[in-house]
Image (cartoon, helix red, strand yellow):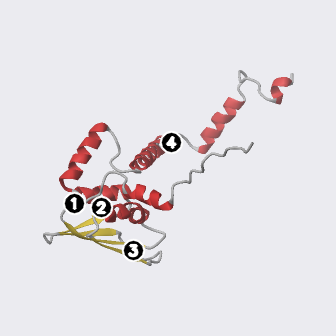
Amino acid sequence: MPRRRGKFIPPPSELSRVLEHLNTGPRLALNGLRRISLTLAARNDHMGARHFVKEELPRIRWANPLLDIEVNKVQKKREDVLKPEAQLEFQDGTKSTIDMSNKWSTTIAKELMDLAGGDPWKAYKAATLAAGQPLLPGEEKERLASLAKSRKTNNASKNQPQSQQGSNEELEAKVREMLNAPDRPKTGARAMLP
């Protein structure tokens, strides 16, 4: 008797993964914005801005197909100084600039949405913050990194010596005294020998 085989279920296609990423909430619809112009280093610098271009900008393009988006990736040398920024031009002619240096991609996206997200973004932000949820996917990584950084700086400040506790000779004398104390418990081979 022939053996029955189960049906083969193919894994998700690349297209379905891309569509899932583009449709991830919240929808990044921008109101009254005519143009975004981004300037950043092509490599080795401006990590948050580069991640913004890779992760958040496709979602912005998906939600705003008529928005004019320009990305200028500049080849720079180590000695060159380039400040990553996003220049926004609104429908009424006003302009605004977002500094993207030393920021996470989610922080850049939140600043952009605060400027041009309009009432839907404000309502979403209020509801999400009231529920204690992250505003954007990936924001929890930003929170964890900032907590780890603050703990690291707190521990470093605790471990710093307070105004010279003594010279090296004094410390060595204290250590010798502790090691030669008669009430010190015997350990290792010393504990086995009489």
Image height check: is 134 above or below 66?
Answer: above
Residue 89 x/y as whole percent: 21, 70
Dot 2 or dot 1: first in sequence order is 2
The residue closer to the viewer here, 160 or 50, is: 50
Q: Residue at x 33, y 63 (%)?
A: 62
Q: Quadrant of the N terminus?
A: top right
Q: Residue at x 67, y 44 (%)?
A: 4
Q: Amino acid at mark 4?
A: Asn
Few, some or many residues within 10 Å of mark 2 (<14, 14–19, 20+)? some
Q: Which residue is under mark 1?
A: 116
Residue 101 x/y as whole percent: 36, 64
Dot 3 or dot 2: first in sequence order is 2
Few, some or many residues within 10 Å of mark 1 (<14, 14–19, 20+)? some
Q: Which mark is residue 159?
A: 4
Mark 3, mark 4: which one is toward the viewer? 3
Mark 1, mark 4: which one is toward the viewer? 1
Q: CA distance from mark 2 to mark 1?
A: 13 Å
User: Can residue 101 be seen by looking at this rendering?
Assistant: no
Q: Secondary structure at mark 4?
A: helix
Dot 1 or dot 4: first in sequence order is 1
Q: Quadrant of the C terminus?
A: top right
Q: Residue furthest front?
A: 1
Mark 2, mark 1: which one is toward the viewer? 2
Q: Amino acid at mark 2?
A: Ala
Residue 162 x/y as whole percent: 47, 41
Left or right of residue 37: residue 191? right
Q: Secondary structure at mark 3?
A: loop
Dot 3 or dot 4: first in sequence order is 3
Q: Which residue is under mark 3?
A: 81
**Tags 1 and 4 in contact by the CB under 8 Å rule?**
no
